[in-house]
Image (cartoon, rainbow, N blue to C red):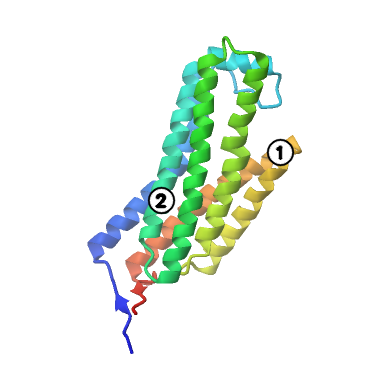
């Protein structure tokens, strides 16, 4: 009968993993929240909503190019931290079932990051062409910008949280929290047919961010205590 191989990181490696995991989670949250603070400080007014007149959207991007570039830059950095979190989290996996689950979750984190990056690029394009673009072009770009970084990003982020929360090793509170965050994120799809449903975008995003922080702390604590699954299944 074969005996499972056991791989147990030393204390120094465990500490570094934990610090990096928490730093990535915090970076994901803080950099995104800075969008509101810093962009508001440099913009002449609040960014018009997608259902506002296209002329207002065009004027805002034409006169707030730096704010648009700053917003996109911070969003890209934020989801860069999300990718780092997902990669680091997958790196803590040891049993084969845990590895497979973490890798599936990582793919959805990459997709969520890609959608936010697309939203940022569309925002940068808007800032560059708004002064000369037609109202119709601005409307299409702004709608795509909103859906990519709002509804679609939050939906995919929710799927990432759902899959990551199912990784063996998490306790019931973290797992249930992940389910709640995922359900609210999926409800953000309502905004595609009913704009008031956009409240689920904000709530789902915040819940997913909170879950990432709680998951980072939970994983780090269990790694430090040696209670995070570590055995590698042997043949």
The residue at the point 49 percent across, 40 percent down is 114
The residue at the point 44 percent across, 39 percent down is 78
Q: Is residue 105 visible?
A: yes
Q: Nearer the viewer, mark 2 or mark 1?
A: 1
As measured in the structure, the alpha-carbon distance from the residue carrying label 2 to the one carrying label 1 is 29 Å
Horizontally, is 227 left or right of 211 in the view?
Answer: left
Judge the density around disc 2: few (<14), some (14-19), many (≥20) Cα neighbours within 10 Å: many
Which residue reaches farthest right? Answer: 194
Whole-percent x, y for residue 224 in the image: 33, 65
Q: Which residue is mark 2?
A: 85
Q: Which residue is mark 1?
A: 192
In the rendered image, the vertical position of residue 222 relative to residue 200, given as above or below: below
Whole-percent x, y for residue 148 in the image: 58, 36
Looking at the image, how many numbered discs can be counted on the residues?
2
The residue at the point 48 percent across, 65 percent down is 167
In the rendered image, the vertical position of residue 62 relative to residue 102, given as above or below: above
| Secondary structure of residue under mark 2 | helix
In the rendered image, the vertical position of residue 71 relative to residue 24, given as above or below: above
Quarter holding the N terminus is bottom left
Question: Of residues 222 and 58, which is closer to you in this image?
Answer: 58
The residue at the point 57 percent across, 9 percent down is 132
Which residue reaches farthest bottom? Answer: 1
Question: Of residues 41 and 204, which is closer to you in this image?
Answer: 204
Whole-percent x, y for residue 184 in the image: 65, 51
Q: Is residue 64 visible?
A: no
Horizontally, is 221 left or right of 29 in the view?
Answer: left
Give the mark nearer the N terminus: 2 vs 1: 2
């Amino acid at each position: 009968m074969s005996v499972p191989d056991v791989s147990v990181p030393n204390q120094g490696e465990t500490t570094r993993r934990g610090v990096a995991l928490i730093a990535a989670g915090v970076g994901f949250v803080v950099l995104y929240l800075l969008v509101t603070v810093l962009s508001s400080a440099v913009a002449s007014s609040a960014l018009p909503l997608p259902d506002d007149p296209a002329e207002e959207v065009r004027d805002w991007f034409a006169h707030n190019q730096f704010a648009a570039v700053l917003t996109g830059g911070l969003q890209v950095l934020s989801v860069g931290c999300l990718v780092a979190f997902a990669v680091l989290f997958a790196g803590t996996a040891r049993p084969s079932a845990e590895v497979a689950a973490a890798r599936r979750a990582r793919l959805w984190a990459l997709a969520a990051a890609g959608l936010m990056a697309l939203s940022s690029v569309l925002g940068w394009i808007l800032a560059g062409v708004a002064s000369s673009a037609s109202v119709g072009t601005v409307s299409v770009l702004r709608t795509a910008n909103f859906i990519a970084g709002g509804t679609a990003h939050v939906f995919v982020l929710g799927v990432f949280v759902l899959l990551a929360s199912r990784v063996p090793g998490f306790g019931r509170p973290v797992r249930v929290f992940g389910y709640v965050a995922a359900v609210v994120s999926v409800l953000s799809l309502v905004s595609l047919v009913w704009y008031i449903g956009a409240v689920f975008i904000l709530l789902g995003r915040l819940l997913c961010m909170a879950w990432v922080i709680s998951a980072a702390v939970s994983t780090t604590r269990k790694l430090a205590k040696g209670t995070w699954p570590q055995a590698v299944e042997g043949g």
